[in-house]
Amino acid sequence: MSERTARGRWAEAFAALGSEPRLRIVERLLEGPVHCREVLDDLKLSQPAVSYHLGKLERAGVLQKERKGTRNCYRIERRLQCVLKSCMKEDGSWITL
């Protein structure tokens, strides 16, 4: 992958993280993989809104989706887990910028 392409992928991932609902999804997924329904229950958002945010994160390469039966299971892209966890305190809250 060229440096320009890699830079573009990072820009896309960071842009996708630029939303509070998507950061809440990431917080939940840093605890481990979850089914779409669990994200829906945790966020108290409508199903279309959750699907929109999950899709945005997946297209940006932040999440990976795995089909398990009739459900979709999501997890943080492995290469991003360390980066995202380094932005958080031990109690799971975000480091203040």
Image (tube, helix red, strand yellow):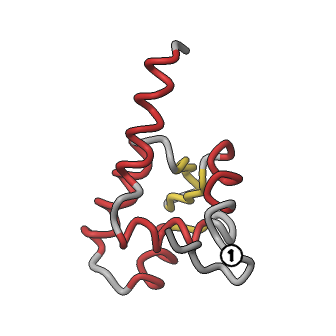
Residue 51 pos. (x, y %): 33, 62
Classify residue 43 by image quadrant: bottom left
In the image, is residue 10 above or below residue 43? above
- Residue extending farthest to the top is 2
Residue 70 pos. (x, y %): 50, 60
Q: Name the foreground residue: 68 vs 62.
A: 62
Q: Mark 1 sits on what residue?
A: 89
Judged from the image, the secondary structure of the residue bearing numbered disc 1 is loop
In the image, is residue 4 above or below residue 7? above
In the image, is residue 20 above or below residue 82? below
Q: Name the foreground residue: 84 vs 55.
A: 84
Q: Name the foreground residue: 48 vs 5.
A: 5
Q: Quadrant of the N terminus?
A: top right
Mark 1 is surrounded, within 10 Å at the Cα level, by few (under 14), some (14 to 19) or many (20 or more) other residues, namely few
Instruction: Left or right? Give the position of 4 relative to 91.
Output: left
- Residue extending farthest to the right is 90
In the image, is residue 47 above or below residue 3? below
Instruction: Left or right? Give the position of 24 relative to 82.
Output: left
Q: Amino acid at mark 1?
A: Lys
Classify residue 34 by image quadrant: bottom right
Instruction: Left or right? Give the position of 9 relative to 55.
Output: right
Q: How many marks are shown on the rendered structure?
A: 1
